[in-house]
Image: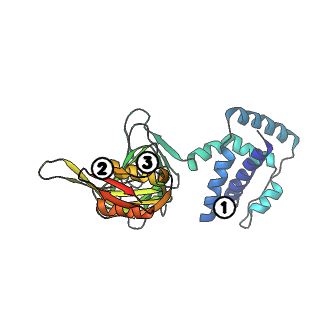
Amino acid sequence: MKNNKDNKLKAFIFFFWGRETSGETLTKNEAELSKLLEEDALKDLDIQHLDLTKKHILLNIKQSSVVTLQKSSYFTTKRLLTFIPAAVIILLLSLSGISIYKTYFQSDVYFAKSVTQKIILKDGTVVTLLKGAKLTVEKSFPEDTRWVSLKGDAIFSVAKSKKHPFVVQAENFSTKVLGTVFKISQSGNNKAVDLYEGKVAVSYEGAPLCYLKPNQVWTNFGIARTAAVYSKNIDEKSGKSVTKIESLSFNEVPFGEIISVIKNYYKINIIYPTGIASKRISAELKGSIDDNIEVLAFAVGLQVEKDNTNTYTLKK
């Protein structure tokens, strides 16, 4: 273990042990700092190093004098650092600190390794983790904002609270609600939020904030800086599910990738000069397919011609 890692560990111990001895309460900012300290200081600990640390500390204690401290109402962390030998403090961590850390600070991690797993959080929220999904919940949950982290797919039935938003931090995007039922899907670059009831706001890096209503889905179609919202309904005559794009936004996305999304969704053919496929453009599409293709063609300085076979040709 390198010296800089030992120093981080000592800093972490001094911070918490000093607070406990002085009886002072962590402020919100200090709590955030403490989280960073604990992650940085403890991430590299292993059993072998812990055993060596214990032996080294016990040797130091034999060579050190015993210091007795009287606790008072004005005892501060700074005074603690003046009187407490570092070896004694590190010993506290070696013998009981890891246990304390796991009990009060280490995040709770739920992993649906091979089967679906249902979890009930402290606020009453029910999370159904699908196979392979992992949910991380901080020990501080629930706070003013109820934060959780998700890898993989899961269905959330969020306990309602007008004062405490519930935020799921997924891979490169987040979903914020007050109380609702929704599903998050993550497969490679493809991200989606499927809303069953209530309302949610989906934030994705490089794309505009999107708000969903029931029976709407947010997706990025597997493309960075792309956001789409489409509605799902049942056709009364056929009984089949039909979808309708409500909004489609691209922010500095290669023209060729945008055309691929349009072609796949609308089941049409679009012909355009191959030389502009890599040209990045930004566009927000909300109209009919004809209007949207006109917008895209205008963005790259082309004209649109349409024949009777649902083929659009973009040319100068």
Depth check: 141 or 135 in front? 135
- Label 1 sits on a secondary structure element that is loop
Measured in 3D between alpha carbons, the distance from the residue under mark 2 to the one under mark 1, in whole angstroms, is 69 Å
Depth check: 165 or 283 in front? 283
Type of amino acid at the residue the image marks with label 3:
Gly
- Label 3 sits on a secondary structure element that is loop
Give percent across and percent down for residue 244. Answer: 27, 56
Sequence-wise, the earlier of marks 1 and 3 is: 1
- Identify the disc placed on residue 188: none
What crowding class fits label 2: few (fewer than 14 Cα within 10 Å), some (14-19), or many (20 or more)?
some
Total numbered badges shown on the rendered structure: 3
Write down the quadrant of residue 54 in the picture: top right
- For the N terminus, the image quarter is top right
Residue 210 appears in the picture as rendered:
no
Residue 240 appears in the picture as rendered:
yes
Is residue 117 rendered to the left or right of residue 279? Answer: left
Instruction: Residue at 71% x, 41% y: name it.
Output: 94
What crowding class fits label 1: few (fewer than 14 Cα within 10 Å), some (14-19), or many (20 or more)?
some
Write down the quadrant of residue 46 in the picture: top right
Q: Is residue 260 above or below residue 204?
A: above
Sequence-wise, the earlier of marks 2 and 3 is: 3
Which residue position is annotated with label 2? 268
Which residue position is annotated with label 3? 222
Instruction: Residue at 49% x, 49% y: name it.
Output: 171
Type of amino acid at the residue the image marks with label 2:
Ile
Foreground mark, 2 or 3, reads 2
Type of amino acid at the residue the image marks with label 1:
Gly
Foreground mark, 2 or 1, reads 2
Which residue position is annotated with label 1? 23
Q: Is residue 299 above or below residue 188?
A: below
Give percent across and percent down for residue 98. Answer: 64, 42
Give percent across and percent down for residue 254. Answer: 48, 54
